[in-house]
Amino acid sequence: MQPNGVSRKTVLAEIKRIRALDNGYDNGNILCSMCTKPHPLAKKAFQTFFESNLGDPGLFPGSVQLEKEVIRELATLLHREKAVGFITSGGTEANLMALMAARNIAKINQPEVILPESAHFSFTKICNLLNLKPNYAGLDSTFRVDLTEVEKHINKKTVAIVGTAGTAELGIIDPIEKLSEVALRHGIYLHVDAAFGGLVIPFLNGKKHRFDFNSEGVKSLTVDPHKMGMAAIPAGGILFRDASTLDFIKTETPYLTDRIQYTFVGTRTGAAAASTWAVFKALGIEGYRKIVGNCMKTTKLLTDGLKKAGLKLVVEPSLNLVAFRSGDTKNLAKKLWGRGWFVTYAPRYDCIRIVVMPHVKRKHVSAFLKDLCEIEKF
Ligand code: PLP
């Protein structure tokens, strides 16, 4: 830090210059992100609650109210009005809180968790932190977790099973209802990572997927407003079926305005809850249905174009996420990147993945397909 500050004008000019180095969602060339341009009201609400700290809730009752209301909305959407929960820093913290609860409830030595091979990498960090041994269950031919594999891994040390509703690489929804039956039969905690799918699946037309608290074995659920919820980062979400579960993740706070804290993160912004609240209010169920419907239409435009160009889909998409291959997929990803398309290559499935978020419009997909066809021709 320099000895004396500089003028406000200088700071702002520098900030603006450096911000221009970042990419913007408006260009429509960010095709690999599970986040998107937040709803305009998300920004307004975030700014309004900019100073708020939900880590010291006695000082910020307004922020507490908004967090409670947002959690109630999510609980109702996910079919368990009595569910309790928090806005977290993201899906990683939400998944951490869930597995911490499961581990502490079981209270056994050398605890283990069963994860689908497709589980998000956040669980690798979480297993490390919580000293949980991960047992990976293989996938079936549709890339869903194989139930016989799950059963095979169950033993006396199993404290939790995880299923995903919308995997990060392929957008796959695991058979949560069946996992729930397995979990109930064995008396094991089931956590569903719906960080991405939790605010897509409820708004899809057509096929219904049971992935939430409708399945009785589901004890907790991650759902992130900062992904398809169009809220500002950092807005993850964790919901627990039963309020009694909170006893297993509580920490006493010796000097704050509240006696107990449940989230892993201490100081945490109320702006995230406010931004989520504002988007929920502004859009309502029908607003989200429209946004998800548009994303799915754009997804179809993309998959039709890819097939026409002779590229192979890894799987027919259930959500707004497309994974495809060519003869040399890794190289194709590089070439697309060279033309300004931000796509990522997923080595686990040898595919390029495209997340058709709300900022990806039909015109962007058409331009992308044009470039792709040109690259493939030469
Ligand atoms: N779970 C899934 C399925 C995800 O897709 C992601 C992120 O993309 C996460 C968890 C982690 O969420 P975050 O990056 O918000 O911590």
Image: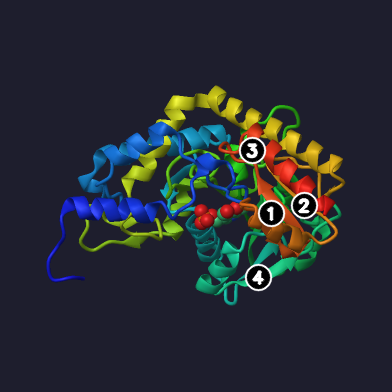
User: Please, which residue is most extreme toward the left here?
Assistant: 4
Q: Which residue is mark 2?
A: 375
Residue count near mark 3 (Cα–Cα under 10 Å), binned few <14, some 14–19, many ≥20: some
Q: Is residue 189 left or right of residue 333?
A: left
Looking at the rendered structure, the secondary structure element under dot 3 is helix
Picture coordinates of residue 147, whole percent (x, y): 80, 56
User: What separation in Å lies between label 2 and label 1 (alpha carbons)?
Assistant: 8 Å
Q: Which residue is mark 1?
A: 336
The reply to whether residue 61 is in sight is yes
In the rendered structure, which amino acid carries the disc numbered 2? Answer: Ile
Query: Upstream in the sequence, badge 3 or badge 4?
Result: 4
Relative to the observer, which residue lies in front, 4 or 231? 4
Looking at the rendered structure, the secondary structure element under dot 2 is helix
Query: Upstream in the sequence, badge 4 or badge 2?
Result: 4
The colour style of the image is rainbow
User: What separation in Å lies between label 4 and label 1 (alpha carbons)?
Assistant: 35 Å
Q: Is residue 37 left or right of residue 79?
A: left
Q: Is residue 100 left or right of residue 181?
A: left
Looking at the rendered structure, the secondary structure element under dot 1 is helix
Looking at the rendered structure, the secondary structure element under dot 4 is strand
User: What separation in Å lies between label 3 and label 4 (alpha carbons)?
Assistant: 40 Å
Picture coordinates of residue 106, whole percent (x, y): 56, 65
Query: Upstream in the sequence, badge 4 or badge 1?
Result: 4
Q: Residue at x 41, y 33 (%)?
A: 40
Q: Quadrant of residue 316?
A: top right
Badge 2 vs badge 1, beta-carbon distance below 8 Å: yes
Q: Residue at x 31, y 54 (%)?
A: 15
User: What separation in Å lies between label 1 and label 3 (alpha carbons)?
Assistant: 13 Å
Relative to the observer, which residue lies in front, 255 or 349? 349
In the rendered structure, which amino acid carries the disc numbered 4? Answer: Pro
